[in-house]
Image (cartoon, rainbow, N blue to C red):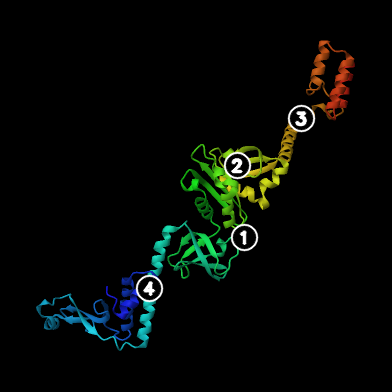
Amino acid sequence: MATTNPLLQQIDAIAKEKGVEPEIIISAVQDALEAAARKRYKSESLRARFNTDSGQLELYAVKKIVEEVTDASTQISLSEAQQLYGDEAEVDMEIEFPRPTEDLGRIAAQTAKQVIFQKVREAERENVYAEYSQRVGEVVSGMVKRFENGDIIIELGRVESQLPRKEQSRAENYTVGDRVRAVIRGVNRSAKGPQVVLSRTDPALLIKLFEQEVPEIYDGTVVIRGAVREAGDRAKVAVYSRERDVDPVGACVGMKGTRVQSIIRELRGEKIDIVEWSEDPILFVTNAISPAKVQRVSIVDDAEKVMEVVVEDKQLSLAIGKKGQNVRLAAKLTGWKIDIKSEEEKRREVELQLGALEVGDSGGEQPSDLEAPAGGAEPDVEESSSPAEPMASAAEAGTPTDVDVAAQAEEAAGELPGTAEDSKSAEDSKDA
């Protein structure tokens, strides 16, 4: 397309600036001319055309050939059309009649300008959506342009993106002109403001940073099986090695921690725990609780995925973390509900359970038959409970003496509180 005409040059310049095709600009100009001409030619059916040879906009009134005319502004009779174009004119064909564009006026020109801007903006937004919707989850770098109600507007080349307040890390502060790396969270097709939404809190940012810093992750030797974050405070990453000789945690940490330190600097000091993933849920949970050391792990409910973890007393606060942060992140990473207890707490719990069992057993072995029945009658020794029965049977066998029986009764009375009188009654019955 030749660009000697001033209008064509201007169209090409706008197309390059907005990143859209020149044909879209031309279509927008044609629509604008039609919209402006309707102010002047209200009842006619109008059609605008851009003449690429002359570089001029042309306006036509379109009339349809019919047998009988019912609307003279949009229809023309067959006989009249044949007078103009001969026998070539047929019913249902359309004839274009040129209309001048010089006298459209200032209001029409303003209308045309608004239509052009609207069409170009729509085309621009469609291009942005088509480009960035394929890049969701990708890390991009931009410059802080301005602040709007707590949100940060970041410039990505020709496109403005938005970093909402809820997607910002509370450990970070920015000023205009700062460079920011963030992950593309989503793209809005119909939003009024910036379409591209960024995030600095999404775990995808952490995963992408590890892919950029750790060659073993980039080439697939080490796989990230999960990542969770509380942006600005702490993050946990579960890694797994496909090769037995490669240590996944060591590969991510790097020599003297150089690899993970660069990621920590990018995230403004956010602590990162790198743990080894395992198919065994008990081993995985044990690793995920780090840096705390675990004593015992037991599955409480496999269906509900509940697990109990016992740690040393001095490790309890480290295992739970600040405001429960460590165990909360471990639960998110593993997918298990984790109940952390100290050894002392677990010991007290076991003692209480044993005590409850002993009380239940003693309640079954100590019936109220040993107590004196109503009316003052002495209890029947033969029907009494276990402490007295062996003593009576031994006496009948003649093996122990009366003194031995008395001693056994006293000893039983000392072991069982509240049974001294019953033992004495048994002794008197023997003497009798």
Instruction: Give the residue at mark 1.
Output: 171
The reply to whether dot 4 and dot 1 touch (C-beta < 8 Å) is: no
Q: Nearer the viewer, mark 3 or mark 4?
A: 4
Q: Is label 4 in a helix, a strand or a loop?
A: helix
The reply to whether dot 3 and dot 2 touch (C-beta < 8 Å) is: no
Between marks 2 and 1, how big is the CA–CA gap? 27 Å
Between marks 1 and 3, how big is the CA–CA gap? 60 Å
Q: Nearer the viewer, mark 1 or mark 3?
A: 1
Q: How many marks?
A: 4
Instruction: Give the residue at mark 4.
Output: 120
Q: Indicate which disc, 3 or 4, sits on the residue closer to the N terminus.
A: 4
Q: Indicate which disc, 2 or 1, sits on the residue closer to the N terminus.
A: 1
Identify the residue at the far front of this view. 255
Instruction: Give the residue at mark 3.
Output: 362
Residue name at image x 51 percent, y 48 percent: 214
Q: What amino acid is labelled 4 in the image?
A: Val
Q: Indicate which disc, 1 or 3, sits on the residue closer to the N terminus.
A: 1
Direction from residue 275 to residue 314 in the image, left or right: right
Q: Quadrant of residue 353?
A: top right
Residue name at image x 10 percent, y 80 percent: 86
Q: Is label 2 in a helix, a strand or a loop?
A: helix
